[in-house]
Amino acid sequence: MVTKSQDRRKVRLSRALGIPLTPKAARYLEKRPYAPGEHGRTKRKTDSDYAVRLREKQRLREQYGIREKQLRIAFNEARRKDGLTGENLVELLEMRLDALVLRAGFARTTAQARQMVVHRHILVDGQLVDRPSFRVKPGQLIHVKAKSEGTEPFQVAAAGGHAEVLPPVPGYIEVELDKLQARLVRRPKRAEVPVTCEVQLVVEYYAAR
């Protein structure tokens, strides 16, 4: 259960980063499209290159709701792979189980998706997985445990209750929402992933550390 203080933090963080991290934050940003604090409405001084890169890194981290250490580990892995490091990074993050639970429409927010995994409601190919960072492989089936299907959060999801706050299901997932199951059909491509971030700036941030 997300507390009111956590909710307020997400709204404030969304305003600071300029992106909605929750449906509530999205509504708030429509009314107050400026940074929090007494100077929020005034024009900011030009940010340094470091500040710009740091903000992009924070944007990416908060959209996946992960710790700094987790993002750094993913970056190091992305750098070792063939191809563009930034695109590899988003691909690796997007194949996390909690990210795919959200993309499939089973949850309304990243925090709720993680909670569903941690509370042992989610199966991958019939096996219970309670680790949000679990990396799903192409071809694997994500589905809700039979005993959990009848609970209110999953009934809301199965009825398409989150459709108005989530982006369209991306092409790398096949979803049967009424059955509460989804399959990762292939590796995601950066252009398809509904994440707001200039990933090259994130690469530059870590490259300079």
Image: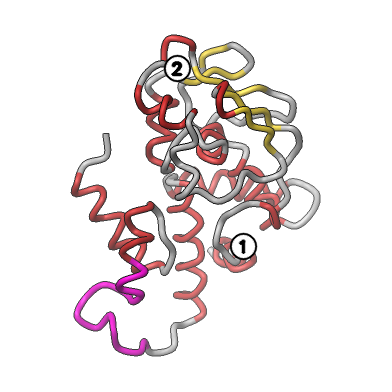
What mark, if any, has residue 149 been given in the picture?
A: 2
Does the stretch in magenta take in 36?
Answer: yes
Name which of mark 2 and mark 1 comes first in the sequence: 2
Image coordinates for residue 59, horizontal then vertical, percent: 47, 60
- Total residue callouts: 2
What mark, if any, has residue 199 been given in the picture?
A: 1
Magenta highlight range:
29-44
SS category of the residue bearing label 1? helix
Q: Quadrant of residue 184?
A: top right
Separation (CA) of disc 2 from disc 1: 37 Å
Mark 1: amino acid = Val
Image coordinates for residue 33, horizontal then vertical, percent: 36, 74
The residue depicted at 67 percent of the width and 48 percent of the height is: 78
SS category of the residue bearing label 2? loop
Residue sitting nearer the eye, 97 or 175: 175
The residue depicted at 38 percent of the width and 60 percent of the height is: 26
Q: Are marks 2 and 1 in contact (CB under 8 Å)?
A: no
Task: Specify few, some or many for label 1: CA neighbours under 10 Å numbering under 14, 14-19, or 20 or more.
Answer: many
Task: Specify few, some or many for label 2: CA neighbours under 10 Å numbering under 14, 14-19, or 20 or more.
Answer: some
The residue depicted at 74 percent of the width and 32 percent of the height is: 185
Mark 2: amino acid = Glu
Q: Can you say whether 126 is above or below 57 in the image?
A: above
| Residue 113 in the figure: left or right of residue 99 | left
